[in-house]
């Protein structure tokens, strides 16, 4: 694809994302089919493109590990995975409801009137825990992350 057309298409996608209210989300430009133009890779790399970006071949699994790593890096600024022990109280249930709306519960079990959660949590909920309920953090690794 010609460079100007590719850039115009990418800019159109970014504009649509902005109109949908997603302009504050991380964006990674992924250029697929690297295996089809491996010889022209150096030329492609010198052309104008949007950043951050990565070249991959989904078919031949080229640069897939780097893709996963880059996605993880981008998302880590928006969420953290933590282990929590939340009491089964009105405050605990209210926090869990907020977590279901804003984050993701990855694992959950109830032990002795406590909700034991592993969750992907956005920064605002992390700040809430740090300020109001630090005792909910269930392990040293989670405490160091937040």
Image: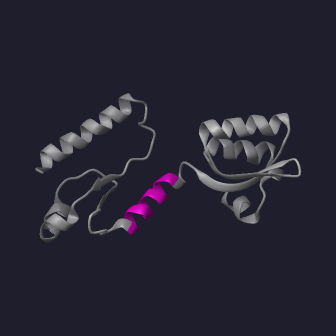
Residue visible at 30% across and 55% down in the picture: 30
Please say if 91 is above or below 63: above
- Farthest residue to the right: give it: 112
Lateral position of residue 112 relative to residue 17, left or right: right
Residue visible at 72% across and 42% down in the picture: 128
Q: Which segment did they paint magenta? A: 65-75
Lateral position of residue 23 relative to residue 3, left or right: right
The C terminus: image quadrant: bottom right
Q: Nearer the viewer, residue 24 or 90?
A: 90
Residue 108: give x, y in percent of width and height. Answer: 71, 51
Residue visible at 43% across and 31% down in the picture: 21
Would residue 72 be counted in the magenta stretch? yes
Lateral position of residue 10 relative to residue 92, left or right: left
- Farthest residue to the left: give it: 2
Residue 5: give x, y in percent of width and height. Answer: 14, 43
Q: Main secondary structure of the magenta part?
A: helix
Would residue 74 be counted in the magenta stretch? yes
**Quarter of the rendering containing residue 99:** top right
Residue 130: give x, y in percent of width and height. Answer: 75, 48
Lateral position of residue 133 relative to residue 6, left or right: right
**Quarter of the rendering containing residue 8:** top left
**Quarter of the rendering containing residue 103:** top right
Looking at the image, how many numbered discs can be counted on the residues?
Answer: 0
Residue visible at 76% across and 62% down in the picture: 139
Residue 74: give x, y in percent of width and height. Answer: 46, 54
**Applied colour scheme:** one colour
Q: Which of 64 and 109 is in front in this view?
A: 109
């Amino acid at each position: 694809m010609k460079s100007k057309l590719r850039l115009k298409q990418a800019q159109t996608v970014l504009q649509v994302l902005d109109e949908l209210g997603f302009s504050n989300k991380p964006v990674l430009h992924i250029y697929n089919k690297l295996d089809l133009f491996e010889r022209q890779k150096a030329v492609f790399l010198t052309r104008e493109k949007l950043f951050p970006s990565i070249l991959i071949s989904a078919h031949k699994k080229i640069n897939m590990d780097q893709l996963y790593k880059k996605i993880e890096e981008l998302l880590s600024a928006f969420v953290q995975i933590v282990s929590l022990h939340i009491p089964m109280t009105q405050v605990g249930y209210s926090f869990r409801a907020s977590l279901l709306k804003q984050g993701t519960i990855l694992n959950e079990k109830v032990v002795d009137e406590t909700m034991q959660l592993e969750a992907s949590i956005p920064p605002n909920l992390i700040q809430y825990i740090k300020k109001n309920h630090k005792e909910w953090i269930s392990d040293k690794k989670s405490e160091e992350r937040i």
